[in-house]
Image (tube, grey):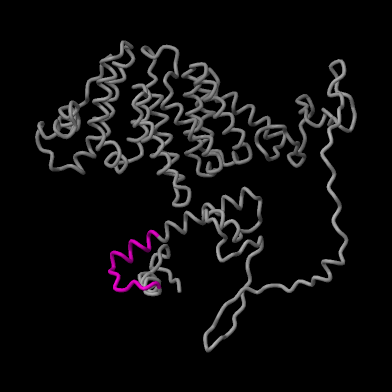
Amino acid sequence: MVEHAENDNELSSESIKAIAESVGVKDLNAECTSYLAKQALLQARTLLRDALKYKLMTHSLELTTDHMERANKRPVPIYASTSQKPRRYCMTTSRGREIYGALDEEIDLDTILSEPPPKIPQDVQVKVHWLTIEGSTPTIPDNPPMEDDKLVIDAPLVSIDNVETVNSVAPHEISREQQLYFKELTTKCISTDKQVREEAVHSLSTDPGLAAVLPRLTVFIIEGIRVGLGDCKMYYIQYMLEMLDNLLQNKAIRLEKFLHDIIPSVISCMVCTQICGRPLEQDHWTVRGFAARILAGLVKSHNLGTNQIQSRVIKMLHHALEKQNSGLVSTFGVLAGLCDLGSLTISTIVLPEIRNIYRRVELKCATSQDPIDRHAKERIKELLVRKCAHVVQEHLPELLSVDDYEQKFGDIGREMFYKVMRPGSHVPIMK
């Protein structure tokens, strides 16, 4: 009964009408059928995506009805089916109609009754043994040998075919040559020599053989960002962001498997209250804007209809923007991330709230004695005017005068008007 539409992504209008007539709804217009087709496609994708998650979590080899039941969150099984195997159906005829029924296997009760009962499982037992004796681990079966977990660095190089397992976060094996390459690469990427560092970082965007060490590179970047944020080392954070930006430009590798770790780290660089030791003297605003551009690049290059990364990131940033107790520095990072996600995000998220956002910024700045808040206010004003001017000109052509802009955007309306009328002008920033 289901037919594919012309674009092979939605149910056809004929299928929607046939389904509606089967439940007693007739005379559906084209707009209703189109809306129902899109909603049915969305629900089917959501159900299938959740079912695949259950399949991965249960380590199953194939998708079964049990996964669909759990994804559908129903109190009763679908069609009363709880089998771990796919159901099989057979066709029969009754009064001139074709009927499909479940093909049930016949079970011989005598065979079941004649089988011996299963063995009773043993109870849990606790055994005491020595882990170490006078600083050394005894060689007993309960303690694994320590030589298996050590990596002998002084050993001679071996062929690439002779791989060794490294006790690391990454789950796959890596050869000795790849270990040395990874160590040399990461050392140069954080080198104090600018030329050496730039050459090493640039190689991340062109080297097609990074797939083997990519899990370790992502762990290195994530841990580097964590250490940089904890110690307020802005230069270290910038090194890690430059590595991530070049990895994103490499067409030979894909970062989908690591986005769940990378995206939170990048957002932390945007919204963290303090990422440097001297926020009034060091230009941490540029680093936050750089992190926002990297986040936009990750979202645009990896967003799909199944993972919905863009909508989830926008929802996260919008929720952070609505917090009344967030600092102005964090507000700047959130706005930078939203504005870099595109004109549609600006027109739907930022512009409707720009009046309330700037009013809250001014109130926060008026009640705060911290000079960084006054600096953040000017940065937020400059960011909003620079990023939103072309969107206002495109989506709000009815605004013609300064009064119209002030009525729409409040205190920031005058600066927005001059930016739209004179695109080459710049909003002054307090030093």
Residue at 40%, 66% in the rendered image: 11
Q: Which of 140 and 295 is in front in this view?
A: 140
Q: In this view, does 309 lie to the left or right of 71?
A: left
Residue 9, given in percent of the width and then of the height, sits at: 42, 62
Please provide the residue range marked out in magenta.
23-39
Query: Residue at point 47% right, 51% down?
Result: 306
- When the figure is inspected, residue 196 is found, relative to residue 302, above or below; the finding is above
Residue 37: in magenta span: yes
Based on the displayed image, in which of its 4 quarters is residue 386 positioned?
top left
- Taking 147 as reference, is 210 above or below it? below
Toward the viewer: 409 or 360? 360
Left or right side of 184 for 155: right
Residue 363 position by quadrant: top left
Identify whether 235 is placed above or below 43: above
Residue in the foreground of this view, choosing between 94 and 195: 94
Picture coordinates of residue 421, whole percent (x, y): 14, 34
Image quadrant in which you'd find residue 345: top left
Q: In this view, does 50 lie to the left or right of 13?
A: right
Residue 106 image offset from top left, x and y in percent: 74, 74
Residue 372 located within the stretch drawn in magenta: no
Where in the figure is residue 13, as x and y percent of width and height? 35, 70
Q: Which residue lies furthest to the bottom in this view?
A: 96
Judge from the rendering whether residue 42 lies leftward or rightward of residue 49; answer left or right: left
**Screen quadrant of the C terminus:** top left
